């Protein structure tokens, strides 16, 4: 499986304000770039915090791209994957609609009755249990790989992105850097979590592209094929 992390940050590396309020960092040109990335993916991964804060759809917006996927024998939209250790995804979350398959990555600490509630609400959800208190990402992603996910696009948030890097699972990082400063020591960043203090993921810059009023930086993770 190839894992691609994509994000949009301010020039100081923030994803949103300290109040976790969304800021328009990129524009239409970058939205279209993200849509291309989704169209090329088998599944799109986010953390449950992103679901709770933004209620994203994670589907392909372009009808032409959805049609092209269908012509190639693929679903119109990539599968949605939510890393959700305790199954906190709301029953009315958009990722649970019938536009695409949905996987919940949960830990053993996720209550069975919570998953039953989601299914009783009509959600077509495949639960993958991995880890005791938190999702064991290597095990969970191996299960996704077995399910046919060859290219996984991870869209955050910062806790999930850090965990993916910490587990050595990231192959490529694509970042749109917008022309604004958000600031705030408590504002979420591209990679939050515990943070690295000694061994840092090494990145190879492979492409720089100006998009609208920002720049897209694309990296391969050193040591990954």
Image: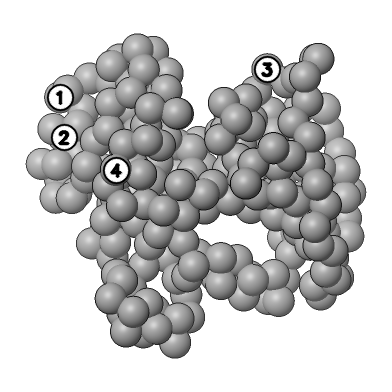
Spatial CA span between label 2 and label 4: 26 Å
Label annotation for residue 34: none
Residue under numbered circle 4: 146
Q: Position of residue 92 (x, y in %)?
A: 29, 49
Spatial CA span between label 1 and label 4: 26 Å
- Sequence-first disc among 2 and 4: 2
Spatial CA span between label 3 and label 4: 30 Å
**Helix, strand or loop at disc 1?**
helix
Residue under numbered circle 3: 194
User: Looking at the picture, does residue 125 appear above or below residue 97?
Assistant: above
Label annotation for residue 113: 1
Q: Position of residue 55 (x, y in %)?
A: 45, 51
Could you tell me which residue is drawn at 80 percent across and 72 percent down? 211
Spatial CA span between label 2 and label 1: 6 Å
Could you tell me which residue is drawn at 41 percent across and 24 percent down? 135
- Sequence-first disc among 2 and 3: 2
Could you tell me which residue is drawn at 51 percent across and 49 percent down? 2
Q: Are marks 1 and 4 in contact (CB under 8 Å)?
A: no
- Sequence-first disc among 3 and 4: 4
Q: Residues within 10 Å of mark 3 (few under 14, many from 20)?
A: few
- Sequence-first disc among 1 and 4: 1
Residue under numbered circle 2: 117
**Helix, strand or loop at disc 2?**
helix
Residue 10 makes an appearance in the image: no
Q: Are marks 2 and 1 in contact (CB under 8 Å)?
A: yes
Q: Residue furthest left?
A: 120
């Amino acid at each position: 499986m190839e894992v691609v992390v994509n994000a949009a940050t301010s020039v100081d590396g923030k994803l949103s304000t300290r109040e976790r309020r969304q800021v328009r960092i990129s524009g239409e040109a970058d939205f279209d770039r993200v849509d291309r990335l989704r169209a090329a993916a088998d599944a799109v991964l986010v953390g449950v915090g992103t679901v709770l804060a933004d209620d994203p759809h994670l589907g392909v917006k372009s009808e032409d791209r959805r049609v092209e996927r269908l012509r190639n024998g693929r679903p119109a939209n990539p599968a949605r994957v939510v890393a959700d250790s305790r199954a906190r995804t709301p029953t009315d979350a958009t990722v649970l609609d019938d536009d695409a398959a949905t996987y919940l990555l949960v830990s053993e600490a996720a209550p069975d009755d919570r998953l039953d509630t989601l299914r009783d609400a009509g959600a077509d959800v495949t639960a993958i249990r991995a880890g005791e208190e938190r999702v064991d990402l290597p095990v969970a992603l191996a299960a996704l790989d077995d399910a046919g996910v060859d290219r996984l696009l991870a869209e955050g948030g910062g806790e999930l992105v850090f965990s993916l890097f910490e587990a050595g699972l990231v192959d490529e990082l694509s970042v749109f850097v917008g022309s604004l400063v958000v600031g705030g020591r408590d504002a979420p960043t591209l990679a939050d979590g515990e943070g690295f203090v000694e061994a840092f993921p090494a990145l190879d810059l492979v492409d720089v592209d100006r998009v609208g009023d920002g720049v897209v930086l694309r990296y391969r993770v050193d040591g990954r094929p």
